[in-house]
Image: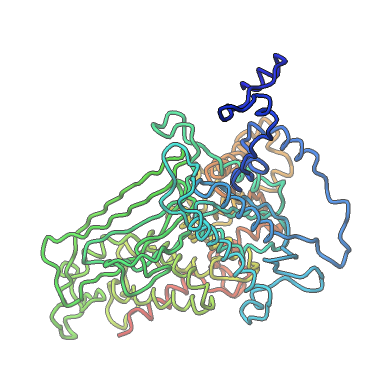
Amino acid sequence: TTASNHAHNGAPPPGPPGPPGQHPHMQQQQPPAQQPPPPPSQQILQRFLLPVSECSLNLESILEDLRCDPWIAPTNLRRNRCTGSALSVATSMLDIACPRRGARVMVFTGGPCTFGPGNIVSREKNKDLRSHADLAKGVEPLHQPACEFYAKLAHASRHHVGDVKGGTSGTSGGGGSGNVDSIHVVDVFACSLDQVGMLEMKELVEATGGLMVLGDSFGQSVFKESLRRVFNRHPEDKPGDGGLMMMAFGASMEVLTSRECKVSGAIGPVTSLHKKAPNVGDMEIGKGGTNAWGIGGIDPTTTIAVYFEVAVPGTTAVPEGKRRYIQFLTKYLHSNGKTRLRSTTLCGPWHNIIPPAPKSNNQQQQQNGYGGQPQEQDPLAPIKYSFDQEAAAVLTARLAVHRTETEDPGDVMRWVDRSLIRLCNKFADYIPDDPSSFRLVPQFSLYPQFMFHLRRSQFLQLFNSSPDEAAYYRYVLTRENTTNSLVMIQPTLLSYSFDGPPQPAMLDCQSVQPNTILLLDTFFHVVVFHGETIAAWREQKFHEQEDYASFRHLLEAPQSDAQMIMDARFPVPRYIVCDQHKSEARFLMAKLNPSVTPNTDGGVGAQVFTDDVSLRVFMEHLMKLAVQS
């Protein structure tokens, strides 16, 4: 400022005082001292990363001037895409420019990577993208190198931060994060009718706590609304967080327990921090061998499944009145730049199972799966009546999905079946070798039904899905809460008719009636299904006549309810409106219990053309196997 003022007044700026006896004019003729070059982080911040207020006009101009590539690729070749190189450049820039500050790298891709590191297919269109069969046989040469490349990107930030440790962090308002492993988040928004490589990029997204969105095109609301909701903010009236973004960075979680239980592992968007502690169990479930995990990006809906094991031998009784304690320490970098630590402590009682005395055969008339004890003397009663079947179903589903990474889905389904049979054998009430006496208390009654739908879900059934779709569905399941996960496992169905208000309907093909409208929520899709008669009335435009206002209200009710579902969900589900016997009706029919098929006699409702067994047949086999002595 001083030099500028002197230049404006027509006088040269004064130089620094020279040594004694030196002429002032000689002092001014000396060349100015050369300024040291700015550090690489400052160079990147000045050239490539700027606040929105300083670059919004230029950025909007660039986006508005974007045009389709005039150099069309030959018909026998795919387009050149270097997604892996672009990700490497973006993550490296953030690692150097802001190693201690939260940031997101958002990938918008419309096709597979075909050039450079991370490529999953060659440019020649006669070379097909990898399929489930290719991956199972191990004949896809580009899959494993691509997975290894993205895995290195996931952990490159950790090593770089270790190199620059001790430098300026640049974090304002309260310091950086205690977990530098995943301070930068990578999100993938893939909109294409073809595969783009989400299977290979999954580990990078999972290790950084990123988000995945899969759609058909960038013009769909699945992409537009999902992108907007990434930047959701807290309500203005929320104390301490009002108006701030809900996202947080560099999160980590540590689990502390009392001596009677140990940590087996965690399943979700986490990476092991390899912290050995006395409460780490020998049995590993998911990512085990530690009691601390890095989560990376986190938001209010992020959910982690933690598995425990009882450290007390079965023959040793826990002292009466002894209670168990579990504490979760969650640390993260808030969007305001401050580090927060949240402590959540749980407490509960122990129950000692005392094996009953053996009984003769004529005394086993009220068998409950544990030594023939009557209900009032059942040693498992406290465990039975405290069982949370919804949470147990989600925990089992996450474990099954985790096992699909290293096992064949068919083997995983058989593991689910064996686990269900053992559970019913131990906790059901029955007379040995008498399936008709099989009974489950209300706390267990829905669990077999959840497992039936899990076996038929897109998480374990790979038919009619690509490797990218399977990876996307499974990743979303491992980060959603119990309510949303249950909707994915067993979708909800509502029935609308003239008989009254909307009613929950059985997820069965018998619920399909010509004079009803069904609303199906599978989490990824929201389907409004019109029965045959309703669709015919709509085609005749009865709803546009004043005399049929009730019919118009009937058509509008499921649409407004579907909009409410979509407004409160991320990623935004695909909205489908279909009619009975039309092509898109398959989205509903594939989720229904096939109680009526061409092979069954009679039955009310629409037929489902499938070889799958119905829930009734499934339960009959389960009861037969569970009561075997």
| Residue 563 horizontal/vertical position (percent) | 58, 41
Q: Is residue 205 left or right of residue 340?
A: right
* The quarter of the displayed image where residue 545 is located: top right
Report if residue 518 is visible in the image.
Answer: no
Quadrant (top left/top right/bottom left/bottom right) for the C terminus? bottom left
Report if residue 298 is visible in the image.
Answer: yes
| Residue 34 horizontal/vertical position (percent) | 65, 39
**Residue in the picture at 28% in, 71% down:** 427
Residue that lies at the very extreme toward the front in this rendered image: 21
**Residue in the picture at 49% in, 75% down:** 413
| Residue 6 horizontal/vertical position (percent) | 67, 18
Q: Nearer the viewer, residue 357 or 603?
A: 357
| Residue 113 horizontal/vertical position (percent) | 72, 63
* The quarter of the displayed image where residue 84 is located: bottom right
| Color theme of the render | rainbow
Residue that lies at the very extreme toward the top in this rendered image: 9
Q: Nearer the viewer, residue 169 or 270?
A: 169
Above or below — where is 484 with respect to 596?
Answer: above
**Residue in the picture at 64% in, 72% down:** 145
Q: Nearer the viewer, residue 136 or 385?
A: 136
Q: How many callouts does the rendering have? A: 0
Quadrant (top left/top right/bottom left/bottom right) for the N terminus? top right
**Residue in the picture at 37% in, 70% down:** 289
Residue that lies at the very extreme toward the left in this rendered image: 320
